Amino acid sequence: MTRLAFWGSPAFALPAFQKLLADKRFEIVLTATQPDRPAGRGLKMQPTVIKQAALAAGVPVLENIPSAADLRAAGVEKIVVVAYGRLIPAEITRGWKCVNLHPSLLPKYRGASPLQSALLNGDTETAVTTMLINSKMDAGDILLQEAIPIEQNMQLKDLSALCAARGADLLVQTLLADIQEIRRPQDEALATCCRKITGEDSWIAPGTSPLQIHNKVRAIGGCLTHRGKRVKILATRYADGVLELLTVQPEGKAPMTYASFRNGYGEIIL
């Protein structure tokens, strides 16, 4: 049985945590996650998904970055990192094999928004990749990769769920493999980076093509001004060069079908 430390925070990391927790070949002896943050209308302090799952399973949780002493005290043999959201200190990467799951076909889309970037760019394929963490962002040696096709109308939430599930399986395969035999360096000449997405990125500029609008909506959502009010485009369908609006949200209102919106607010001209 391999004693693991699991470092992760959002829902994307949950399938991997659950799969490793249920596998009798591994024991998660320590979890690291982001601190509680205010969320929801009342801005109450909320723990991360991984913290909730770890506490429910009786696994110790640290919200600060674990030290080498913490890891040694817990008897950690390997570290698994899935969407942790913080840099791993050099003393940790030098002392333990840190296996990271990243949802892109590395070295493509290193950084904070690989799935959003793949959808924004209209890619027809992405991947889940396991790699060793080094001092540079998402630049460590690749261990295993599995390609994942992206359908024309696949939304971010669906692609993320698929990658999270496939990635969990790939992590198990990686941890059972001889890492020294499967590791291979990334080709730096092919490396691309993606930045963190902001609210400003969702605005739809005049002249944007129907396909570009569709890709933006399914990746991060779209925003535009209609009769002086902001409208969010939440879901679209694209086929044979034709864009169909499915779900929208007028400013200050709940989401609604585009058919209902058009009856009350008029047609959106793109």
Image (cartoon, rainbow, N blue to C red):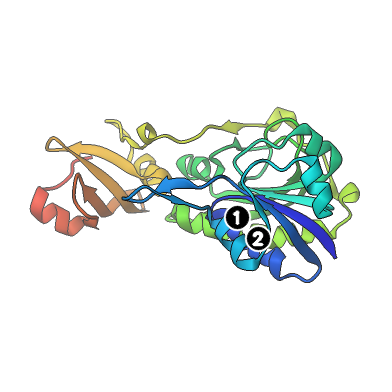
Image x and y of residue 172, in percent: 75, 61
State the residue position of label 1.
13
Image x and y of residue 195, in percent: 53, 32
Q: With respect to residue 39, does 14 lie above or below?
A: below
Image x and y of residue 260, in percent: 15, 59
Q: Residue at x 90, y 47 (%)?
A: 180
- Position of 243 with respect to 155 (left or right) is left
Q: With respect to residue 61, does 191 lie above or below?
A: above
Contact (Cβ within 8 Å) of mark 1 with mark 2: yes
Pick the residue in front: 30 or 181. Answer: 30
Q: Residue at x 25, y 51 (%)?
A: 248
Spatial CA distance of label 1 from label 2 is 6 Å
Q: With respect to residue 58, does 110 lie above or below?
A: above
Question: What's under tag 1, amino acid-wise?
Answer: Ala
Question: What's under tag 2, amino acid-wise?
Answer: Phe
Q: Residue at x 10, y 48 (%)?
A: 266
* The N terminus, quarter of image: bottom right
Image x and y of residue 173, in percent: 78, 61
Callout 2: 10 Å neighbours few (<14), some, many (20+)? many
State the residue position of label 2.
17
Pick the residue in front: 15 or 231. Answer: 15
- Position of 177 with respect to 82 (left or right) is right
Q: Quadrant of residue 87?
A: top right
Pick the residue in front: 44 or 127. Answer: 44
- Position of 135 with respect to 239 (left or right) is right
Please, what secondary structure does the residue beneath circle 2 have? helix
Q: Residue at x 43, y 54 (%)?
A: 155
Evaluate whether residue 163 shows in this view.
Answer: no
